[in-house]
Amino acid sequence: MNRPGSFFLAAALASLFATAPARAQDKLEIFSWWAGDEGPALKALIDLYSKKYPNIQVINSTVTGGSGVNARAVLKTRMLGGDPPDSFQVHAGQELIGTWVVANRMEDLSDLFKSEGWMAQFPKGLIALLSARNGIWSVPVNIHRSNVMWYVPANLKKWGVSPPKTLDEFLATCKTLQGKGVQHPLALGENWTYNHLWESVALGVLGPEDWTALWTGKLKFNDPKAVKVWATFGQVLDFANPDASGLSWQQATDRMLKGTAAFNVMGDWAAGYMATTLKLKPGEGFGWEASPGTGGVFM
């Protein structure tokens, strides 16, 4: 399943991250949106690379903005302007294949996967997600789980509710919370977090098989099953804060932590923010479950 937030490195034509030393170039640019709370993880990767290849200068080009909204705009300008970065962060799947791969702007990494033995190391389903047109087009560096619902255990205990397991339970729990004074039980942020939430709701309504069928064309978007996704999504949004567009994803998470909201659906990178930046103890300062209806599924 495609996952927003996952970190893959794609190599633009005339440059290749993993084989940079073999090309005898003395610089390597990594273009990404990993900054702020996620910056240390990228720095650790760069430090490891620099230790192995000390003669290569790594240029860390970051464009801030959740989910790469701003970075993709800058990348498009550079790609169309003839100034592609050596490598860049991308979400696996059609975000890359449906844009720069079909435009013949990328380098096939199939030989690299074979020489490094990665064909046997990565799950077949993941490699399929990276593949098209008889090629493999990006290297998995980090894989996030998207379908996670966050909460504060002490707050739920205070309100007398439990983490909902299903979408019906979620809607009922939010209704109960409103009766206890929590006006907007679900904390949402800027626009891309709506898309993020929609994916979790869609998976919860459809289940894994129909979710996949939706993107392969086997299940049409006007099928009653797919229409139900939108109806349920609307019900979920009824419990969200109306000022979401003015909040970053971190600020939305903060509302959940401060108790003005009960739940926040966000990828597992939120754990890094809460545990590393805010110094909260997992399981106490914050808790988590699979987003309602998606238990046992990793998206």
Image (cartoon, grey):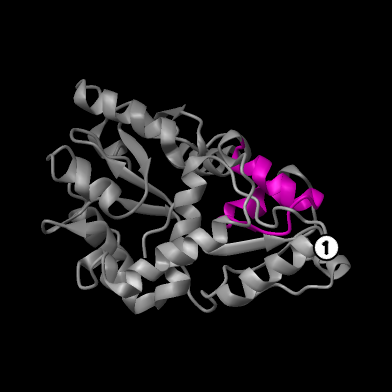
Q: For the point 44% across and 51% down, which residue is it?
A: 195
Q: Amino acid at mark 1?
A: Lys
Q: Residue 274 or 126: which is nearer the viewer?
A: 274
Q: Is residue 164 left or right of residue 129?
A: right
Q: Verify whether residue 259 appears in magenta.
A: yes
Task: Tell whether 270 sits left or right of 72.
Answer: right
Tell whether 107 sits left or right of 148: left
Which quadrant: the N terminus? bottom left
Decide: is 184 above or below 208.
above
Quarter of the image holding residue 178?
bottom right
Tell me, yes or no, if residue 198 can be seen here. Answer: yes
Q: Dot 1 corresponds to which residue?
A: 180
| Image quarter of residue 289 | bottom right
Crowd tier of the residue under label 1, counting other residues whose Cα lies within 10 Å: few below 14, some 14–19, many 20 or above: few
Q: Is residue 173 above or below residue 30?
A: below
Question: What residue do we see at 12% from left, 40% from top?
Answer: 104
Range of magenta residues: 247-274
SS at badge 1: loop
For the point 73% across and 47% down, the residue is: 255
Query: Residue 70: where, in percent of width, then height?
Result: 42, 30
**Image quadrant in which the C terminus is located:** bottom left
Is residue 124 in view from this perspective?
no
Position of residue 229 measured from the top left corner of the image (x, y, whole percent): 41, 67
- Rendering quarter of residue 78: top left
The x and y percentages for residue 152 are 78, 61
Work out whether residue 31 or residue 172 is closer to the camera in this orientation and state it.
172
Vertical arrangement, residue 116 with respect to residue 101, above or below: below
262 drawn magenta: yes
